[in-house]
Image (cartoon, rainbow, N blue to C red):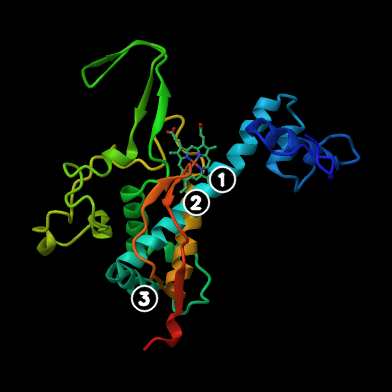
Amino acid sequence: MVNENGLNEITTLKNVGVALKQWESRSSPPDGSGWSEGDSLLRHVFTRTEDINEASVLAVDMFLVGVDSTSVAVTSTLYQLSQNLDKQEALYEELKQVLPSPDTPVTNDHLDRLPYLKAVIKEAMRLKPVVIGNGRLITRDTVISGYQIPRGKQVVFPHYVISNLEEHFPQAHRFLPERWLKVSQDERGCPWLNQKVHPFVSLPFGFGRRMCVGRRFADLEMQVLLAKMIRTFRVEHLHGPLEYSIQPMFTPDGPLNFRLTDREGLS
Ligand code: HEM
């Protein structure tokens, strides 16, 4: 269906690609190269492919994996911090030490000195991974943990299930960023502190050749945004606990009416 702007209505995933390709090609550079400095990655791909399937996959990737994933991860982390105000205070204290004022631009050097911030993000992604599982198509007969998997079958790595098992994370249902910190000798008695975490039991970005290519970028975005927000505001959610649901990212389900209170005004 074509709308009043002469573009396809976005009614299917494929139409997302068709519509974007039309939009991108409306103003090609006059030199005929189809590509000039400053152009978007999307345009770059569209000038090189006539394959609308490829274009559609890219278009959906841009919206879903490039934007939604990170915003849902930040939202979910803020929600967890609003439900665990003692952890939010601990994060604020760390941020106050490293960032002299809420307006301080966040640099790499600051991020290197914010272990609790990183632990908070890891813990939010463990407790409620944005992508709850990954699939792989088995390309040759394989044995995994004693199970024979024939070629052509699909297997799923259920992040959400595995990262919430008590055998891997004591008190798995609790939001405990401290479990990701290196701790001192005298704190070692605590079951969820100084754990040796198996490297495969929390993989929010997947693993292997097809793991998330945006991981470093997403991590940086989340760290900077959360550092700025928690350094500036106390974040509360006063409308009761929220369930999470798959939409298709795993996200708190409900109106997220956060109350942000400027820390400067707090005694
Ligand atoms: C918190 C944010 C994000 C999470 C939790 C996340 C998670 C994931 C996961 C679980 C996969 C599948 C990995 C696998 O199969 O082993 C994936 C793939 C991918 N992600 Fe992300 N992602 C995030 C942000 C981003 C961003 C910001 C971008 C782009 C800038 C991005 C681009 C991609 C792409 C292109 C793939 C497909 C890689 C491939 O199939 O080779 N992601 N992501």
Place of residue 157 in the rendered image (x, y in percent of width and height, measured from the top left): 34, 31
Residue at 43 percent of width and 73 percent of height: 231
Under mark 2, the amino acid is: Thr
- Which residue is label 3 attached to? 97
- Which residue is label 1 attached to? 66
- Secondary structure beneath label 1: helix
Ligand 1 neighbours mark 2 (CB distance < 8 Å): yes
Place of residue 82 in the rendered image (x, y in percent of width and height, measured from the top left): 36, 67
- Which residue is label 2 attached to? 70
Place of residue 97 in the rendered image (x, y in percent of width and height, measured from the top left): 36, 76
Asked whether the viewer can see residue 164, the reply is yes
Question: Pointer 1: residues within 10 angstroms few (<14), some, or many (20+)?
Answer: some
Under mark 1, the amino acid is: Gly
Under mark 3, the amino acid is: Gln
Locate the N terminus by quadrant.
top right
Q: Are marks 2 and 1 in contact (CB under 8 Å)?
A: yes
Locate the C terminus by quadrant.
bottom left
Q: Earlier in the sequence, mark 3 or mark 2?
A: 2
- Secondary structure beneath label 3: helix
